Amino acid sequence: MRPLRAPLHPRLPERTPAGDLRPIASALVAPVGPGYDPALRLRRRAVALRGGPDALVVALSWAAGKVRVRVLASGGCSSDDAERAIEVARGLGALDDDPREFLGMVRGHPILGPLVHADVRLARSPTLFESLAIAIIEQLVTGFEARASIRRLWRIAGAPVAGTKLVAAPSPVAVHRVPMWKMHEIGIGARRAVTLHAAAGRGAAIERLRDLPPPVMIEKLETLPGIGPWTSNAVARNALGWADAVPISDFHAPFTISAALGGPMLPRSELAAANASMLERLEPFRPHRARVALLLEAQALRETRWRPPRVDAHRREPWRH
């Protein structure tokens, strides 16, 4: 499984799309708190929120210390659509996530203090189902495999924006229509495909979980077969921007985080012990444990000299996963 980090998305163009889109609204938003990194936060310059004849797109750019949000549409678009698009753009750009409490908490910390030059804001995806679908695809496989499968699923089930290369994330209905054999063909093994189909079949109910407190959302999400604590915490962080999500049972994170914070170096066979050690050492950093995990995992990746295989052992028996 991948570390708990921002969700993977298909590659998007650098420039604002043209096509038949017309500007319908704009806003200039100052990020909350210090240390905003536009190079990191605005990599997705244009994001399709809706495809088809009534396409809706948000375009983000940096201008004089603020983020310029432009809403573009084709076909019909109401004022409610424009307001929602601006709100979604604020989440995508992590404009309202204030890191100041966390920065004060770790200032002077011997391990985390030197790392907080990085932007530790947490973005929010447009829909909870989008983050859930991505997290399910990321289960049990390498990042290379996950990115490839996500791109393929977006291509066959997403809604394209005419005249551009943009594709809106597939809706639950569209994902549910993708047959199991097609899921397998694009690299989503049987176990993950079954979980993804089950989640897509409950798309409306899943989206309503966004209105619940994150711990309650996690508890309800884990009632779905195939959804465990790693997936539910990934969704809480990436869809809700919840700063206290933890990468429980991740392949790397419990070992990496525990060791970085002074815990024992445990073998891979002792995942339960690594989870317990990680949670114990993250406890003083509530309610910002996700930010600690983000900093330590990024540091571990920078220090890693080896490169993981592009295709891991799970692909040798893809029907099991």
Image (cartoon, rainbow, N blue to C red):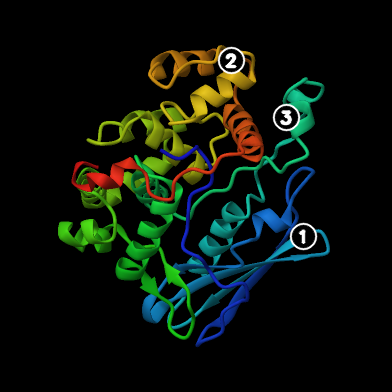
In what quadrant of the picture does the N terminus appear?
A: top left
Question: Whole-Å distance between the Cαs marked 2 and 1?
Answer: 36 Å
The answer to whether residue 180 is left or right of residue 305 is left
Q: Which residue is mark 1?
A: 66
Name the secondary structure under disc 2. Answer: helix
**Snapshot quadrant of residue 302:** top right
Q: Image height check: is 213 above or below 76?
A: above
**Can the viewer see residue 123 in this picture?**
yes
Q: Position of residue 152 (x, y in %)?
A: 35, 64
For the residue pair 238 and 301, the one nearer the viewer reads as 301
Residue at figure coordinates x 39%, y 59% from the top left: 148
Q: Image height check: is 75 above or below 318?
A: below
Sequence-wise, which precedes: disc 2 or disc 3? 3
Q: Which mark is residue 281?
A: 2
The answer to whether residue 296 is left or right of residue 85 is right
Question: Whole-Å distance between the Cαs marked 3 and 1?
Answer: 21 Å
Q: Which residue is mark 3?
A: 101
Residue at figure coordinates x 44%, y 26% from the top left: 248
Q: Nearer the viewer, mark 2 or mark 3?
A: 2
Q: Position of residue 27 (x, y in %)?
A: 68, 66
Name the secondary structure under disc 1. Answer: strand
Q: Image height check: is 123 above or below 279?
A: below
**Snapshot quadrant of residue 101:** top right
Question: Whole-Å distance between the Cαs marked 2 and 3?
Answer: 19 Å
For the residue pair 92 and 9, the one nearer the viewer reads as 9
Sequence-wise, which precedes: disc 2 or disc 1? 1
Indicate the amino acid at tag 3: Glu
Q: Position of residue 167 (x, y in %)?
A: 43, 71
Indicate the amino acid at tag 2: Arg
Residue at figure coordinates x 59%, y 19% from the top left: 259
The answer to whether residue 31 is left or right of residue 211 is right
Indicate the amino acid at tag 1: Lys
